[in-house]
Image (spheres, rainbow, N blue to C red):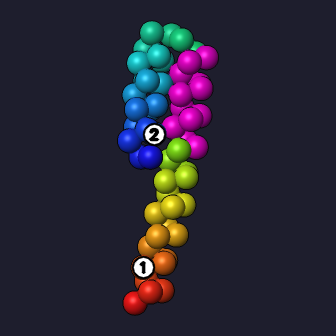
């Protein structure tokens, strides 16, 4: 999922360079959401591994 966030971030940067505001905004929004989901899953997995030991 982090890979998808990185892809949308790159798409947003390319779109911003060419001036496509709507595409850049949408891609940044998707990248942020995917990053937050990845971060939450990482923390949950980390806590589960610590609790299991």
- The part of the image, by quadrant, that contains residue 25 is top right
In-image side of 30 versus 49 (left or right): right
The residue that appears at 52% across and 69% down in the rendered structure is: 44
**Relative to residue 3, is residue 38 depicted above or below?**
below
Between label 2 and label 1, give the one nearer the viewer.
Answer: 1
Q: Mark number for residue 9?
A: none
Q: Mark number for residue 5?
A: 2
Q: Picture coordinates of residue 6 (x, y %)? A: 40, 37
Q: Picture coordinates of residue 11 (x, y %)? A: 43, 24
- The part of the image, by quadrant, that contains residue 28 is top right
Q: Which residue is mark 1?
A: 49
Q: Picture coordinates of residue 22 (x, y %)? A: 61, 17
Q: Picture coordinates of residue 20 (x, y %)? A: 54, 11
The magenta segment: 22-33
Is-magenta flag for residue 25?
yes
**Relative to residue 45, is residue 33 depicted above or below?**
above
The residue that appears at 49% across and 54% down in the rendered structure is: 38
In-image side of 2 versus 31 (left or right): left
**Relative to residue 53, is residue 46 depicted above or below?**
above
Viewport quadrant of the C terminus: bottom left
Is-magenta flag for residue 48?
no
The residue that appears at 53% across and 28% down in the rendered structure is: 27
Q: Secondary structure at mark 2?
A: helix
In-image side of 26 versus 13 (left or right): right
Contact flag, marks 2 and 1 (Cβ < 8 Å): no
């Amino acid at each position: 999922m982090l890979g998808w966030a990185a892809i949308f971030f790159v798409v947003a940067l390319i779109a911003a360079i060419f001036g496509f505001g709507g595409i850049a905004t949408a891609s940044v929004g998707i990248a942020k959401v995917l990053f937050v989901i990845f971060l939450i899953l990482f923390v949950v997995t980390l806590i589960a591994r610590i609790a299991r030991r």
